[in-house]
Amino acid sequence: MSIVFYSPILLIIDVSLYHKSMGSIFLQVAILVFVYMTVWYSVSLVLKRSDVADLAWGLGFICISLFLYLNNPQNPTIKIVSLLVFFWGSRLSWDIFDRLINSSEDYRYLQLRQQWGKWFYIRSFFQVYLLQGIFMFLISLGIIYASQSTANSLSLQIISGLVIWYIGFALEYVADTQLKDFINMPQNKGRLMTEGLWKFSRHPNYFGEVTQWWGIFILVANQQSLISLISPITITILILFVSGIPMLEKKYADRPDWQDYKNRTSAFVPWWPKIDK
């Protein structure tokens, strides 16, 4: 987690070495994210459900990329990256919206309500919405640097980044679609999804999401923008060690069928399942 905690220091150093005007862009994006997450916090108070924070996630990156594109619409790199973010964010947000309107508040937030008690609304502002905003800002570093890219043509680097992003997008889309179809079948109630891509990874959708952000980093990376490495590293750490895999797997830890699935299936990177001897 050290890369996340030291990132503000690295960011200040990078701004001074790269270009003074970048400081203004970072500040503008930071203010945008703060206002954006505060608005969503207000929405959660009105609706009395804090899982709208999940919906704010993908839409937030779309807002950031749109803001940066409008600030520099002639830049071809931010055009490309904005499209990639729009495809990813809109698909993810639609899936989450569909889940929200067809269910009650997510169990994770219900647990927080019980744990935090009367302090829930205050703590949720800082520990859910503002904390999510900080991570959103760090992960959006690749988008910010894309808006300042001087690349004017498709290079091997940009094509490589696009290919990696597409692989990640396809994996996440297929995995989410397979899971949704599985859940919607009544005969699968109470069963674990262990088919399709889920046969090769316990979290193929998470792997796809992380892969997309590494693709964007490769697309924009140069000597001046190496600080944007914080973007894919942050999302990788979050999913592997914080709010992604650990929280989800904790939910199934006591199930015997989960332990069997866990023992034979890769946690993250898709790989052939272990065969019982």
Image: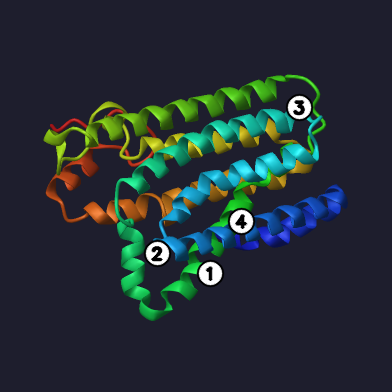
Mark 2 against mark 4, which lies toward the viewer?
Answer: 2
Task: Name which of mark 1 and mark 3 comes first in the sequence.
Answer: 3
Q: Horizontal placement of 42 versus 33: left or right?
A: left
Say which amino acid is labelled 1.
Phe
Say which amino acid is labelled 4.
Tyr
Say which amino acid is labelled 2.
Lys
Reading the image, the residue beneath label 2 is 48
Mark 2 against mark 3, which lies toward the viewer?
Answer: 2
Please name whichever residue, 96 or 80, is drawn nearer the observer in this view of the structure. 96
Reading the image, the residue beneath label 4 is 36
Q: Quadrant of the C terminus?
A: top left
Between the C-alphas of marks 1 and 4, the distance is 14 Å
Reading the image, the residue beneath label 3 is 76
Q: Is residue 35 visible?
A: yes
Task: Name which of mark 3 and mark 4 comes first in the sequence.
Answer: 4
Q: Image quadrant of residue 23? A: bottom right
Reading the image, the residue beneath label 1 is 126
Q: Helix, strand, or loop for circle 2?
A: loop
Say which amino acid is labelled 3.
Pro
